Amino acid sequence: MSAVLAAVYDNHSAAEAVRVRLVKDGFPTDRVELTSRQELGQAKLVPATRTGDKLTEYFRQLFPESHTETGVRQLRNAVETGHAVIAVLPRGQVETERAVQILNDADPLEIKARDLNKQTLEHAAAEEETSALSWIGRVMVAPQVRDRNRNPE
């Protein structure tokens, strides 16, 4: 597994609508995963007894770097408190940009990203040699994510 985008939404139905949109847009169902209290998705396959442990291990598989342990805990807590997470495994610049657009259009609470700049074999799907996305280390800054705590202007 390489590139991953994970977006947190208010609830299961909001995330489910995003999953439907991604699949209708052409993302294969095996690269779009929904995790919520109503639907554990791939997390239910983790060999752990407690749901919290399943969630931790699942999100740790998506974000294995040690510096993301806080992110893993945040994703687990989001699901446990009733939010839902959509994880997308994009391939190449075109899919990454499209996934970011679709995830942002649904007004996520937050987006986490991993290894978006390590898609070396996916240049065939890129429209140009360089990416228009902004990068900070291994984390992408999703420019369209709105600050929900700020008043609209």
Image (cartoon, rainbow, N blue to C red):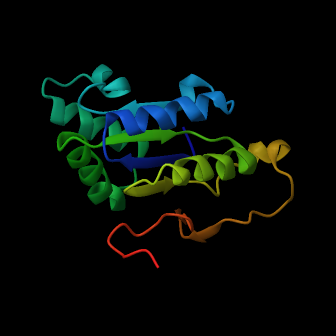
Name the residue at 31% across, 24% down: 39
Residue 123 vs 146, above or below: the answer is: above
Q: Position of residue 12 (x, y in %)?
A: 33, 34
Please indicate whether residue 128 sits to the left or right of residue 72 in the image.
Answer: right
Residue 58 vs 39, above or below: the answer is: below
Name the residue at 23% across, 31% down: 37
In this view, which residue lies farthest toward the left? Answer: 50
Q: Position of residue 22 (x, y in %)?
A: 59, 35
Q: Position of residue 5 (x, y in %)?
A: 51, 48
Question: Who is closer to the viewer here, 28 or 14?
Answer: 14
Name the residue at 40% across, 39% down: 14
Query: Which quarter of the rendered picture does the N terminus lie within?
Result: top right
Please indicate whether residue 53 sits to the left or right of residue 17 in the image.
Answer: left
Name the residue at 30% across, 26% down: 40
Question: Who is closer to the viewer here, 20 or 131?
Answer: 20
Q: Position of residue 63 (x, y in %)?
A: 41, 48
Residue 23 vs 62, above or below: the answer is: above
